[in-house]
Image (cartoon, rainbow, N blue to C red):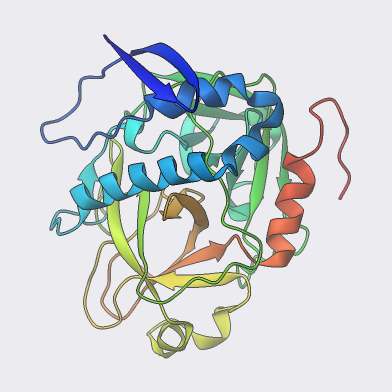
């Protein structure tokens, strides 16, 4: 453990930073200067996350991680061992203790994931592991109170592939457990924009799952190119999906087990790992849920902006 002091705005504070043993060359980024203030501002968390100064800090941390990942030749597929402290919103969703999907912390009681991760699961069988880089140990486990699938989710096409998990007890924020702000409603997502995807999914198609958290840098793809790729054109909904990866050659990609996990750009959550054909195949980009889509963004915020003790019907 090391003790670090920070100055954020006009508040001076000291926090304890717990280090975690990991594989060699593990990528680490430190969010300590945000963690304390996020905990203090829980009652107005979304307002806090939307502050210009806070958004800039998230962006700086994102670019720090991106610099460490860019150019990596290792495989999320092509990923690198990454400390949970570098992506502290990342969670592992488990069904009867077995890891099934990833997710992202969006408030102290809400986890965002993919709808297809929740379709067949009962909330009573679900739990969430947070704060650990290791898939199967460390961190803390939280029980799930309720789970919700987007009402316009279409399982055949994966359109509107978004789901929410409500925890029984609120999270305590730390440098290893932090929320991330969603991209703005109807915000534009340019082609060839760098992003970071993370998770504990398979390290290669048909191979074993990662035991230690992986992350990789990846580029968003123009929808026109995505629809010209090997993916079936009619399966791609331009409103609720976007693609990332390479059109011509294998590139870093999410794989089985990464579903529901985050894809982040410029310090904001732009998407959820949704679907693809195989893993890291050339001409087969990964497909992600577009969180800025009005139908999805409004549904998410209808839940996460509701007071904890209020029953939600949307």
Q: Position of residue 171 (x, y in %)?
A: 59, 21
Q: Quadrant of residue 252?
A: bottom left
Q: Quadrant of residue 161?
A: bottom right
From this view, report whether residue 68 is shown above or below residue 255. above
Horizontally, is 313 left or right of 55 in the view?
right
Q: Nearer the viewer, residue 313 or 183?
A: 183
Q: Nearer the viewer, residue 133 or 66?
A: 66
Q: Position of residue 14 (x, y in %)?
A: 39, 11
The quadrant the N terminus occupies is: top left
- Residue 131 in view here: no
Q: Residue at x 65, y 32 (%)?
A: 45
Q: Residue furthest front?
A: 10
Horizontally, is 148 left or right of 219 in the view?
right
Q: Residue at x 86, y 50 (%)?
A: 314
- Residue 20 in view here: yes
Q: Nearer the viewer, residue 192 or 144?
A: 192
Horizontally, is 9 left or right of 255 in the view?
right
Q: Position of residue 63 (x, y in %)?
A: 30, 50
Q: Residue at x 24, y 68 (%)?
A: 251
Horizontally, is 110 left or right of 230 in the view?
right
Q: Position of residue 53 (x, y in %)?
A: 49, 41
From this view, report whether residue 139 is shown above or below residue 1. below
Q: Quadrant of residue 154?
A: bottom right
């Amino acid at each position: 453990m090391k003790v670090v002091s920070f100055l954020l705005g006009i508040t001076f504070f000291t926090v304890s930073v717990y280090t975690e043993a990991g594989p060699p060359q593990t990528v680490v980024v430190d969010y300590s200067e945000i963690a304390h203030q996020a905990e203090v501002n829980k009652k107005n968390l979304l307002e806090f996350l939307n502050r210009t100064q806070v958004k800039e800090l998230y962006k700086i941390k994102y670019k720090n991680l991106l610099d460490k990942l860019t150019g990596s030749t290792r495989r999320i597929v092509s990923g690198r061992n990454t400390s949970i402290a570098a992506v502290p919103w990342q969670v592992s969703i488990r069904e009867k203790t077995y890891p099934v999907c990833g997710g992202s912390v969006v408030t102290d009681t809400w986890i965002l994931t993919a709808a297809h991760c929740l379709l067949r699961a009962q909330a009573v069988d679900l739990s969430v592991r947070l704060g650990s880089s290791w898939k199967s140990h460390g961190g803390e486990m939280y029980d799930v109170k309720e789970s919700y699938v987007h009402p316009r989710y279409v399982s055949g096409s994966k359109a509107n592939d978004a789901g929410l998990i409500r925890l029984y007890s609120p999270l305590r924020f730390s440098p290893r457990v932090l929320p991330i702000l969603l991209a703005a409603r109807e915000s534009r997502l340019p082609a060839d924009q760098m992003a970071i995807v993370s998770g504990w999914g398979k390290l290669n198609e048909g191979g074993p799952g990662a035991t230690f958290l992986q992350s990789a840098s990846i580029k968003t793809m123009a929808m026109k190119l995505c629809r010209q790729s090997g993916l079936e054109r009619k399966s791609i909904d331009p409103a609720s999906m976007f693609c990332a990866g390479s059109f011509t050659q294998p590139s870093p990609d999410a794989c089985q087990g990464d579903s529901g996990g985050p894809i982040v750009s410029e310090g904001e959550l732009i998407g959820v790992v949704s679907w693809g054909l195989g893993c890291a195949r050339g001409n087969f980009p990964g497909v992600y849920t577009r969180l800025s889509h009005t139908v999805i963004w409004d549904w998410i915020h209808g839940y996460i902006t509701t007071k904890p003790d209020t029953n939600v019907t949307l």
